[in-house]
Amino acid sequence: MAGMITGWRWFNEPTTWTAEGDTVTITTDPDTDFWRTTHYGFVRDTGHILGTELDGDWTLTATFRGDYRDQYDQAGIAIRADERNWIKSGIELVDGHQQISAVVTREFSDWSVAPVPNPRSVTIKAERTGDTVTIAYGLDGAEPTTLLRLAYLPPGTPVTAGVVAASPTGKGFTTTFTDVNLTPGG
């Protein structure tokens, strides 16, 4: 992964992060999130993304684990066209339990979660093919074959894709990405 992130850029770089070998560790800053309007009435575009610009079809896979402790602590992958159009998916701590989560935003955010048994690690796979992003996951080293979400993303729209972490209500937490792979084509 070290070679992978060469040339990758931060969107909202966190105060504390490290990259060693094939591992990236992020400690989130407090009051960071990605959200637009729905239910809560606020707009946040402050979460941390380490990514690269992409166009066309591609597959992004990331394996990670986190020391989630506060409501809505989150880590995973992000696909961001701009502040009004983006997708994030991974683990989010909700009411004291890890939930597999996906947020798709096209002007307004929508959020879905499903309970998972507090896995040691999660692998998220996002595959962009034409106008579709297919998101799947695997727990504790399993291949990401469980379908979580199909989402629309206009074809020909360049995006920044990479890893994401945020702490909307907490004081920050640490998450570690041990395997990130980006493959051109669908």
Image (cartoon, grey):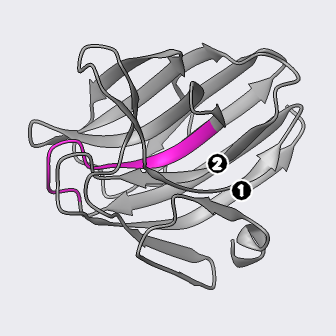
Q: Where on the picture, by quarter, is residue 114?
A: top left
Question: Is 112 placed above or below 22 here?
Answer: above
The N terminus sits in image quarter: bottom right
Q: Amino acid at mark 2?
A: Thr
Where residue 115 appears, as percent x and y from the top left, is 24, 29
Task: Verify CB contact (< 8 Å) between mark 1 and mark 2.
Answer: yes
Q: Is residue 143 visible?
A: no
Identify which residue is drawn at 42% across, 54% down. 165
The C terminus sits in image quarter: top right
Q: CA distance from mark 1 to mark 2?
A: 5 Å
- For disc 2, the neighbor class at 10 Å (few under 14, some 14 to 19, many from 20) is many
**Horizontally, is 128 left or right of 162 in the view?**
right
Q: Which mark is residue 61?
A: 2
Span of residues in magenta: 68-79
Identify which residue is drawn at 90% across, 37% down. 185
Q: Which mark is residue 24?
A: none
In magenta stretch: residue 69: yes
Where residue 110 appears, as percent x and y from the top left, is 40, 16
In magenta stretch: residue 113: no
Question: Is 163 placed above or below 112 here?
Answer: below
- Residue, far left: 95
Where residue 51 appears, as percent x and y from the top left, is 67, 56
**Horizontally, is 66 left or right of 2 in the view?**
left
Using the image as rendered, state which of residue 172 and residue 151 is in the foreground.
Answer: 172
- For disc 1, the neighbor class at 10 Å (few under 14, some 14 to 19, many from 20) is some
Q: Which mark is residue 181?
A: 1
Identify which residue is drawn at 63% across, 37% down. 79
**Horizontally, is 183 left or right of 30 in the view?**
right
- Residue, far bottom: 20
- Residue, far front: 42
